[in-house]
């Protein structure tokens, strides 16, 4: 029918467009509401009395995924939690209390009202585990187990008070658990000859031990397929014991900042060949051998993070040719990487480009144009995200290759690529040094086209040109014409003027996040013309735009009603009084404003 067709059409729109479409008519509202009920849309609800009416409304719409913020042990928080249980609980599938401080009683009451939960995030909820008495009563634990019988994913990250006893009580209430995060929890490692042979009755009431976790993994091996042990300091012998668990078939494993790991990775890759996602970022002892082990043992890997492996070289990159199904590769901050072997490896996968959708080589400062130019054509049309931030040696040649071969990009980050010039963005032939003395040369010399301009990337949703300091209005006014662009950073561009600001406003009307910090030539007059073009703006950074005054805040306040955050720190023409007037007009906005005390500049968040 027509309603189903409309719902199907709206499902292709970004979230912000779906919200706008819901205002067209009642039929469109109902269609958009159907789309927004999907489990991948999370509703962020501040815990306060003003949210009670919204919770009831969301309950009528059958919303299944929420995140509660500002949660504490107050009576007001208890009232909100009870309202969530009453109105949202029966159909709630994903619940995040991250960083909150609920009381044990209110938490239990909430869980008992949510029998359909599949995902529960308690990361940072330290007060909940401080007493060690959570679920200590058997009858309470039994009721919670019935409510959480279908829970598939549990995050207990960053819990300094988590101990074996409280972990066992909670985990025993989740018989269907498939994904577990203990990232940045304090694990103790004292593996003895029995290696995890302790029973639940021997659980420690004061510390979280790896022996206890290993016992849990052995019991749940048949079902558990995702573990996050990032930041736990996992030692080599613990990783070896984990990989040897009989019946364990992990699909996802995160070991971010487990710095002691080295050659033991080879055994893990042989023991867990079904891994599709592996995060080894920050494991500083890993070198080329680790990548070779990954390539040989994990043929079905789809997501691989090797960020900040400063011992990794081009020699190791040759092993990537064996990862036929790789979709996401993060090699940011691998400072020895020059890119030559990477280009050959990615171009040799089964004689065709791999299905890479995301590639990050940010902060790989040794990358040069030559290697990147050989890499880009091998990436293929599937690439959607490319991050070359702080690859400071790259020039217009790289920009031209991107515009030629990667026309389907949705995210392009080139921050701090200081050698990029107007010619590269415009797709023009770069003039001789004798004649290229400023942007005026673009008019005087009529340089010949050399290749496609930035305008070829019609699918762009995010663009970062932060600190590309040689760019000027000459190119920015012509190429920043992306009606669907959502996020843009032009911070630290000293030549950016009101002319470019107005052109960007007209060419990119759908922006939700905009960064223009340290653009000191921008003025109130420019914002008076530009603000009306950005009704969807949510985050705005104008810090250190020293010509701006309260008139700019007035222009923004009248036009940008969707704002959540404005940063005007180090803007001496904007006073605290004007910020307060602005917030009275838009109460939901967080403003960051400088406060000068005795010659010092402090940042004040209102």
Image: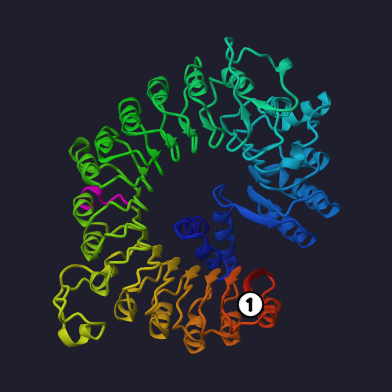
Q: Residue at x 45, y 40 (%)?
A: 282
Closest to the observer, 304 or 75 = 304
Q: Is residue 188 above or below residue 18?
A: above
Residue 8 appearing in the image: yes
Q: Farthest right residue? A: 75
Q: Is residue 603 magenta?
A: no
Magenta stretch, residue numbers = 376-383
Picture coordinates of residue 78, whole percent (x, y): 82, 49
Residue 113 appearing in the image: no
| Pointer 1 residue | 599
The answer to which image quadrant residue 118 occupies is top right
Q: Farthest front residue? A: 598
Q: Is residue 381 magenta?
A: yes
Q: Residue at x 76, y 60 (%)?
A: 53
Picture coordinates of residue 151, whole percent (x, y): 63, 33
Q: Farthest top residue? A: 193
Picture coordinates of residue 251, whole percent (x, y): 45, 30
The answer to which image quadrant residue 160 occupies is top right
The secondary element bearing badge 1 is classed as loop
Q: Residue at x 20, y 54 (%)?
A: 373
Q: Quadrant of the C terminus?
A: bottom right
């Amino acid at each position: 029918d027509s309603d189903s067709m409309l719902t199907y059409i709206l499902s292709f729109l970004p979230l912000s467009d779906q919200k706008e479409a819901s205002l067209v008519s009642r039929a469109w509202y109902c269609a958009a509401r159907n789309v927004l009920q999907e489990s991948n849309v999370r509703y962020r609800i501040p815990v306060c009395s003003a949210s009670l009416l919204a919770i009831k409304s969301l309950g009528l719409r059958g919303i299944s995924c929420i995140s509660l913020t500002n949660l504490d042990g107050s009576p007001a928080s208890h009232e909100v939690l009870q309202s969530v249980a009453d109105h949202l609980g029966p159909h709630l599938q994903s619940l995040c209390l991250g960083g909150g401080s609920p009381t044990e009683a209110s938490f239990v009451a909430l869980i008992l009202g949510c029998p359909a939960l599949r995902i529960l995030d308690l990361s940072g909820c330290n007060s909940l585990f401080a007493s060690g008495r959570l679920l200590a009563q058997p009858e309470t634990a039994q009721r919670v187990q019935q409510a959480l019988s279908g829970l598939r994913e549990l995050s207990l990250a960053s819990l300094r008070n988590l101990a074996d006893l409280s972990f066992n009580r909670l985990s025993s209430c989740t018989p269907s658990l498939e994904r577990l995060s203990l990232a940045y929890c304090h694990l103790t490692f004292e593996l003895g000859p029995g290696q995890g042979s302790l029973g639940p009755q021997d659980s420690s009431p004061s510390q979280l031990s790896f022996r206890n976790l290993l016992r849990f993994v052995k019991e749940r091996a048949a079902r558990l397929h995702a573990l996050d042990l990032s930041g736990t300091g996992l030692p080599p012998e613990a990783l070896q014991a984990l990989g040897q668990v009989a019946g364990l078939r992990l699909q996802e494993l995160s070991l971010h900042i487990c710095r002691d790991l080295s050659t033991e990775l080879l055994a893990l890759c042989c023991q867990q060949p079904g891994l599709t996602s592996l995060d080894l970022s920050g494991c500083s002892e890993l070198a080329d051998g680790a990548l070779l082990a990954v390539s040989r043992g994990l043929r079905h890997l789809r997501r691989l993070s090797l960020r900040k492996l400063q011992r990794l070289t081009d020699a190791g990159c040759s092993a990537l040719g064996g990862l036929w199904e790789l979709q996401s590769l993060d090699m940011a901050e691998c400072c020895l990487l020059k890119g030559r072997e990477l280009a050959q490896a990615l171009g040799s996968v089964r004689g065709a480009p791999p299905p890479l959708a995301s590639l990050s080589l940010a902060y790989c400062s040794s990358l040069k144009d030559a290697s990147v130019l050989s890499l880009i054509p091998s990436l293929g049309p599937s690439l959607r995200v490319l991050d070359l931030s702080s690859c400071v040696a790259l020039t217009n040649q790289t920009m031209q290759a991107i515009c030629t071969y990667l026309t389907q990009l949705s995210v392009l980050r080139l921050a701090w690529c200081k050698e990029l010039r107007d010619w590269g963005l415009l797709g023009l032939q770069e003039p001789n040094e004798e004649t290229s003395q400023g942007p005026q040369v673009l008019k005087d010399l009529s340089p010949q086209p050399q290749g496609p301009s930035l305008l070829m990337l019609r699918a762009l949703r995010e663009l970062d040109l932060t600190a590309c300091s040689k760019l000027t209005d000459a190119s920015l006014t012509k190429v920043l014409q992306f009606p669907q662009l959502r996020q843009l950073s032009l911070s630290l561009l000293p030549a950016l003027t009101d002319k470019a600001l107005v052109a960007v406003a007209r060419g990119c009307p759908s922006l939700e996040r905009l960064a223009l910090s340290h653009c000191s030539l921008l003025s109130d007059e420019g914002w008076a013309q530009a603000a009306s073009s950005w009704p969807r703006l949510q985050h705005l950074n104008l810090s250190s735009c020293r010509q701006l005054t309260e008139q700019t805040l007035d222009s923004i306040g009248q036009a940008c009603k969707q704002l959540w955050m404005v940063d005007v720190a180090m803007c001496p023409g904007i006073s605290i009084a004007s910020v307060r007037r602005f917030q009275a007009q838009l109460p939901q906005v967080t403003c960051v404003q400088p406060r000068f005390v005795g010659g010092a500049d402090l940042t004040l968040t209102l």
